[in-house]
Image (spheres, rainbow, N blue to C red):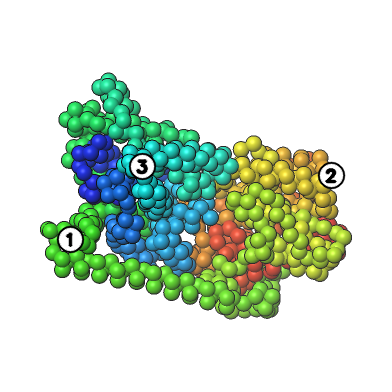
Amino acid sequence: MRLSTRVREENQDAPRRTAGAEYRLDLDGLRGLAVALVVMFHIWMGRVSGGVDVFLVLSGFFFTGMLIRRAESTGSVDVVAMVRRTLARLLPAMVAVLAAVVVAAFYISPYTRWSDIATQTMASMFYYQNWQLARSWSNYLAADPSVSPLQHLWSMSVQGQYYLLAITVVAGAAWALSRRAGTARLLRPVLLTVIISVGVASFAYAVHGAATHQGWNYYDSFARLWELLAGAACVIVAPMISPPRPVRWLLAIAGVAGVLACGMVLDGADLFPGPAALLPVGATIAVIASGANTEPASRPLPNRLLGTPPAVRLGELAYALYLWHWPLLIFLLVETGRPRAGFTDGVLIISASLVLAWMTHRWIEQPLRSGTRTPTPAVPTRYRRAAWSMIAVAGVSVIGVTSAWHFVIRTQSTSAVSAFALDPAIYPGAEALVSGASAPLAKMRPTVLEAPSELPPPTLDGCIADWNTRDVVTCTYGDTTAERTLAVVGSSHAEHWLPALQILAAENDFRIVVYLKMGCPLTVAADPMYKGQPNPDCRDWSREVIDRLGADRPDWVFTTGTRPVDDGGDETPQDYLDVWSQLSARNLNVIAVRDTPWLRRNGIRYSGIDCLSKGGDRLSCGMKRDHALNPVDPALEPAAAYPNVFPIDLTDAVCEPDICPVVEGNILIYHDEHHFTASYSRSLAPALGRELQPILGWW
């Protein structure tokens, strides 16, 4: 899911017939095949096709080759000119798409999503979108209405970062060698040594990342670097090889077959850029090698087919097609509310993407392709100036609009009223359900714009291990001098009870020690998963926490005892029982709280504040109780076998008899799809206290 820049354009600065540098139409066609697979797999199959890895190898091959040939022919690389030319090729189409997405988001997306879109727009514009997504472990396995329309641009960021690195390294090597004779002869061996050394380190890093934190690994620039360097190595090695005809045919057939089959045999979102990425990378290298140092007419049939006009033309449109198809898909899903595009919708998306790609290529990319010093003869200078002016205005507008919205959000967040300032007579929250407290007409608090800042203290204090922190992080809340200790352990679904527990701790003299990690309820599973991805850090973290609890000896351990089921209801999985056994073996007492309803429709999580911002109300934005939860707490029956495990169920403090709403007692329940606002959590303190009192006996 990223695109190489115009291969033909990159080569126009180099001699057309130098060794290994002959223009490869078949590789243009390979890029067209790869983008076709990317689009089809995104729209209809919900899988990663491997096309992004093909693009990365081709980018490394063509861009690095262009730099090396320029350094060999001139003795240097004009860094400023090269950066300017590269941005001139990449930015105009990117700015056009970003501007269109911002406008579409204004009309289609709920305004509560605008902040995320603004953040990702800026990240895409300045080529750090991959890091933005890595921090949140965004799932790129499939599209659905909750996914960002700019998520695919992570790969453009990886490409842009590589281009800057390649320019710097090649320019530095050329400068260092320019003081010696035989610069042209030494440059390639020196660069090949660097490429192999760094590439091996990058591959080893990617292998480790695939085994430890794949969600981060997928977007990590260094983990992806070996794929680009594989293409860069081909630039230097290709002129040295001339496989015999049977080997060329074998390489061509195997290469094209590998590219075609990759998405079917591998689930790239869970595996790439680890060892499994050797399939698309190796397949691309095979196609490059199969056509090296031979005339087009003498190449194997697969190469000649890739070099036909339709395939080449699709390759020319690949960059723009890649930019457009994903936003169109996501906005269609937002409008229809469906989890996947059907056949007809998919055909419409592809058709619209092709039209927009052609228009972008014809009216933006081609006219602005050449440097300002050599305007394209077929394009009047007046048009080029007008086009550049429009792109500049669009770029400045995008930056201005997104920056302004961030300012609005920050203003709203900092003006949020502290939950302690909410008058319980007006904002009873959970007490309106469990005690029948009256809730007069009043403005909902927090508002939908304030809600994202309504986070529990450990998140705000850095006292919860994030996705990429393996270490056990602990902090103490409540009465820090008290002798009685309650340990809050597990994921953010244990954490969001902390505001309620803090009130109880202040009233009843006990301290709270947190052992928390994002996306990681305690587990002893050999291969825990998060969002369908392996999460071995969670396994190792959990084992250490269980041992720490055995050593620290808290009076009670507070953690979640159930989890939702995608098809509806909730469960207490065997893994939770195995954790209870581990805690029982250490003579630890456990309070297992039933997890909160997770807002879902058609199997897709949705945000309550998004629904409210689009005109929904507290009930229509909620879930049917019988779909959110089982009739009886599923932890009750298995807990009976564990004398030290005490399940509690606060469902009646969150849900009405038939509906689990998103607002109760004038307080917004969720700040996202399934986490309490700090305000609602605090309103749960009386109900939680009534559940805990007979178990703890502390008040």
x and y percentages locating residue 239 in the rendered image = 29, 33
Q: Going 67% across and 64% down the picture, which residue do you hit? A: 461
Circle 2/circle 3 CB separation < 8 Å? no
**Which is in the foreground here, disc 2 or disc 3?**
3
Amino acid marked by disc 2: Asn
Quadrant assignment for the C terminus: bottom right
10 Å neighbourhood of mark 1: few (<14), some, or many (≥20)? some
Amino acid marked by disc 1: Pro
Which is more toward the observer, 191 or 163?
191
In the depicted structure, whether residue 131 falls above or below residue 668: above
Q: Earlier in the sequence, mark 1 or mark 2?
A: 1
Which residue is denoted by mark 1 in the rendering? 375
Secondary structure of the residue carrying tag 2 is: loop
Which is more toward the observer, 687 or 284?
284
Amino acid marked by disc 3: Leu
Specify whether residue 1 is in view: no
Which residue is denoted by mark 3 in the rendering? 187
Q: Earlier in the sequence, mark 2 or mark 3?
A: 3
Q: How many marks?
A: 3
Q: Going 39% across and 72% down the picture, which residue do you hit? A: 401
**Numbered tag placed on residue 546 in the rendering:** none
In 3D space, how far apart are the residues under numbered discs 1 and 3 (Cα atoms)? 32 Å
Which residue is denoted by mark 2 in the rendering? 587
Q: Going 57% across and 75% down the picture, which residue do you hit? A: 414
x and y percentages locating residue 497 in the rendered image = 69, 61
